[in-house]
Image: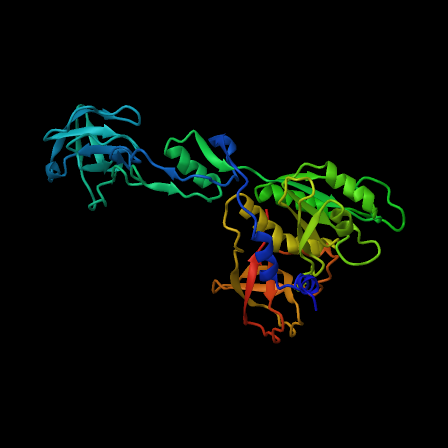
Amino acid sequence: MGDDDLSRKTLKNLTVDEARGRMLAGAARLGVEEVPLAKALGRVLAAPVVADRDQPPFAASAMDGWAIRRADLVPGARFQIAGESAAGQAYGRPVEAGQAVRIFTGAPVPRGADLVVIQENATRDGDTVALTIDRDPPPGNIRPAGGDFRSGDVLLTEGARLDAWRLALAAAAGWPNLDVAVRPRVAILATGDELVPPGYVPAPDQIFESGSFALAALVEAWGGQATRLKAQADDRDAIARAVAEAQFDLLVTVGGASVGDHDLVKPALQTLGLDLRVQTVAVRPGKPTWFGVLEADGVGGRPVLGLPGNPASALVCAELFLRPLLAALTGADPGLAIETGVLAAPLPANGPREHWMRAARAVDPDGRVRVTPFSDQDSSLIGVFSRADCLVLRPAGAAAADVGDVVQLLPLARG
């Protein structure tokens, strides 16, 4: 067997890990841009966020009440009211012996005070106030300066995906703009004579195209910019023209991924210089999934992920391959967020391909995650996928599993 034959042979029936490794081998962050904080939701940080100020920058009251010197609080003591400290309007003098300062939540604690007595334990009479405490409040109802973070602390690391809470942290540190990874431009091309867009009247032998809509939504959720190209019939020249005219950093094709007479995507892209890196994957569903790099236009290195036409196969393989690819192209962690659960129903022995089964999770009274794979795992069933909230992994050649056996699962983001 020659080297070329050996090379072609090693492109077929790769394990999921092998295939994903080949896809990620050349993937790297595309670039960096600065965006306003208000536009950074869902973006991936390209530089750390470091505090240049303590938060809070002063000792602050945790309650509405009265700021005093703890040593002055003796039975029967009355305090002379010296002034007020409110948020943004600090009492500017130190608290002296026998004095109390009216203080509100979040306001700076005056110098000299080390205890805030809550207002429920105060009785005011003109310019004086009597204070009591039922128990010593830890730690004096005062939030220390720098209690949240201190100047020089790394608050968010490069590669972190920005959610609402991380944006709040960056805002609390005073960052108006953030350096983030450029969002990959992802072109999605569905192919097949049988496809018509939703809203059209299909012929008796046609179906509505659905995969590109789901994939575009996933691309946007995973940090990319999705463009749905016009679906193409099984026409090699038309497919090649559609791709040649598109602008993208990553191309995702849906359908035409197998080796039948009507599976023309790879032949079409080979006319544009496709360098095939993965030909098939030993996974169920999704064996026809393939991957290559398009280099004909001299730019080089534009990855192409070919997904099967069956929607469930395409979406399972999007979770396994497209999501990690987008993470790598934005500088985020491309690893799968695998969790564990216990089976709520038995499963038969698995065959020679790794199987990712659509399933639903529930938490039992003991706090255990119980997963129930759906009984029908046909790769064409979108209805099943719409009810699933995780994928259960069955390793290749796995023995039969009983109720209560621990399994690995990949959560699916559900609204």
Quadrant of the frame with the N terminus: bottom right
What residue is drawn where x is 61% and y is 73%? 398
**Residue 8 shows in the view:** yes
Rendered image quadrant of residue 10: bottom right
415 sits left or right of 127 in the view: right
Closer-to-camera residue (65/138): 138
- 160 displayed left or right of 267: left
Where does the image place residue 97, in percent across and percent down from the top left?
A: 9, 31
Residue furthest front as drawn: 2
**Residue at 61 percent of width and 76 percent of height:** 399
Horizontally, residue 104 falls left or right of residue 242, namely: left
Q: Nearer the viewer, residue 288 or 115?
A: 288
Q: Nearer the viewer, residue 189 or 7?
A: 7
Q: Is residue 174 left or right of residue 126?
A: right
- Tell me: residue 197, above or below residue 85: below
Rendered residue at 28%/23% (across/down): 89
For residue 385, what is the image quadrant?
bottom right
